[in-house]
Amino acid sequence: MSDVLISRWDKLVAAQPDALAVIDNRSQWTRSELDARAGEWAQKIPTDQLLQQAVILCQPNGADWLAKFLALRRAGAIIIPVDAATSIEDSKKLAQKLSCFALQSSEHFERFSQSRKWPTDLALVKLTSGTSGEPTAIPFTEAELCADGDNIQSTMGIGPSDLNYALLPFAHSYALGNLVIPLLASGIPLVVGSAPLPRIIADEITRSGATVFPSVPTVFEALTRTDELSLGKLRLCITAAAPLTPTLAQRFRNACGLSLHNFYGASECGGIAYDHTGQCGLTGNAVGAAMDNVELSATNDGRLCVRSAAVSSFEREAGKDGRAIITLHDKVSFLDNGGVVIHGRVDRIVKCAGKRIDLAALEKVAIAVDGVERAAVVHETASDRLLVAIIGPTESSTTLTALQANFGAWRGRLRVKSLPELPVTLRGKVDYRELSRLLGG
Amino acid sequence: MNHAIPPISELIPHEPPMILIDRILELSADCVHAETTLQPGALDDNGTGVSSAWSLEIVAQACAALIGQHYRDQGFREGRLIKSSRWTLSTLHLPTAQLLTIHATIEAASDMGIFLFNGELRAGDTCLAEGQLTILAR
């Protein structure tokens, strides 16, 4: 069993047992206390039967999530973290689909009758958000998880003197790379946020002295609406999972004086690009430049290729340099300064009225209309129509006119509706299935 | 980590020395990424390198590997390169003794077994050949 992550944690505990690890619900946990808690959990699970067995971890953020993670990994289990909001019924369905050994929830360790052994080196299986389809399971080794955490810390300049504010669900790829792995592999402590409410977030950040806050645009948007926003010692705000608009970047800077740093990643490979300057969000073109130790290129049809030690090597082979490569669905181009510009996804190109159209191109034109702050498009297959949702103080007819002028071949297929806000998933991404329902699809 | 990419020889009908790909790095349902190093004297190399026309065959073999891995269950066993469009060569000869990378993505696929690929062959940052290939699989 490859246990580079657990080895690094053990060394951190041995070196500084009394160092702060977690602040959870106003309780402080040192590294040794968290480790001891992991030992307590280990007493409650069949550690001798878990080697190479998959266990679903469905638990709210907190010290116990981390302690159970450590206990399961020490026993050689392959952890499949899922949202704490996932129902027990859905967790069981997933467990059956993936032939899991058990479900570890807040209350129980429930064992299933049929399970299978997974490959030796695996440590964790990430589930993609599934916003455009069924969630996909992506396995990782501890070495790959550590590589992502290390790349993130190095690129973003995060170190043990920092304190992460943890509002992102630990089960998400973004949180694993920015919160969980930096704690367990490098000792960067975290404070667990108690609720995604702007005033509570601001109070907890100030009170705890948190210095780094990785989150999503919708949370930062909510913070900008808070009167007299004060964020204490916070020095770095990272935004990912959904596009950052220049309007929000500017509004946030005006509200608290801090820049929002764009971060772009994918479950399959962890961090990809990062905006060191905090300027990319304001200009709205590039999402940032390649992360440290991550090599980016594009195929001749524009798809992004990522090569790094953090890419899941499951069903892939590492190249001669020991790094695996993955081709993503995102279409990109590169600026002279290395900035990565995203031009939508290949899987958002649909056939409508017998012709292929990129839904991202429609969104781009809609957003360029005066007053439109955000836009999202879905293709309704039954009626073969393009349904456009816009957010902002403008008439939908203005946007429709602009779209018809730019996409004449589809003018009869376009419908535009103004919504108060776009539906988002727990991960802060646009929920296209819900959007389709709202638009009447 | 354990992986599930079979050897190239299990994915295409060719036999050495006509297997022109050394290893496959990525083989998803819609893209393939592979590496090869052409040995001096291989194919038609007479000291100046391999004719760049071989780029078509090299990329086509990668495409065939993808079909062999992911579309075998649909009954497709073998394929023929029936068309190339906008196949652009930046050199007359492909270098030998140098790592070349092959990349191809599926642009479109039909149930009838027609696969349209965007493919390219590179030596480091230099694109040696690129364009579209149409493969008919049966």
Image (spheres, rainbow, N blue to C red):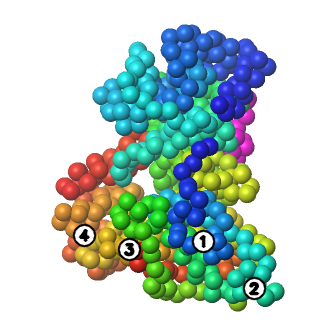
Point out the frontmost of discs 4 and 1. 1
| Secondary structure of the residue carrying numbered label 3 | loop
Q: Is residue A256 above or below residue A79?
A: below
Q: Residues within 10 Å of mark 3 (few under 14, many from 20)?
A: some
Q: Amino acid at mark 4?
A: Leu
Identify which residue is drawn at 41% across, 37% down.
Answer: A98
> What separation in Å lies between label 3 and label 2 (alpha carbons)?
33 Å
Q: Is residue A153 magenta?
A: yes
Part of the protein shown in magenta: A149-162
Return the disc, 2 or 1, that comes first in the chain's sequence: 1
Identify which residue is drawn at 35% across, 58% down.
Answer: A376
Q: Amino acid at mark 1?
A: Glu
Q: Amino acid at mark 3?
A: Arg
In this rendered view, identify the residue nearer to me: A165 or B57: B57
Q: Looking at the image, can residue A209 be seen?
A: no
Residues behind callouts 1 and 3 on a single chain: yes
Q: Is residue A364 magenta?
A: no
Quarter of the image for the N terminus of chain B: give it: top right
Q: What mark, if any, has residue B15 been given in the picture?
A: 1
Q: Is residue B44 above or below residue A380?
A: below
Tell me where residue A46 appears, x and y as whole percent: 51, 15
Residue at image mark 2: B45
Tell me where residue A148 appears, x and y as whole percent: 64, 43
Identify which residue is drawn at 58% across, 82% down.
Answer: B56
In this rendered view, identify the residue nearer to me: B97 or B131: B97
Residue at image mark 4: A414
> What separation in Å lies between label 4 and label 3 (alpha carbons)?
39 Å
Return the disc, 1 or 3, that comes first in the chain's sequence: 1
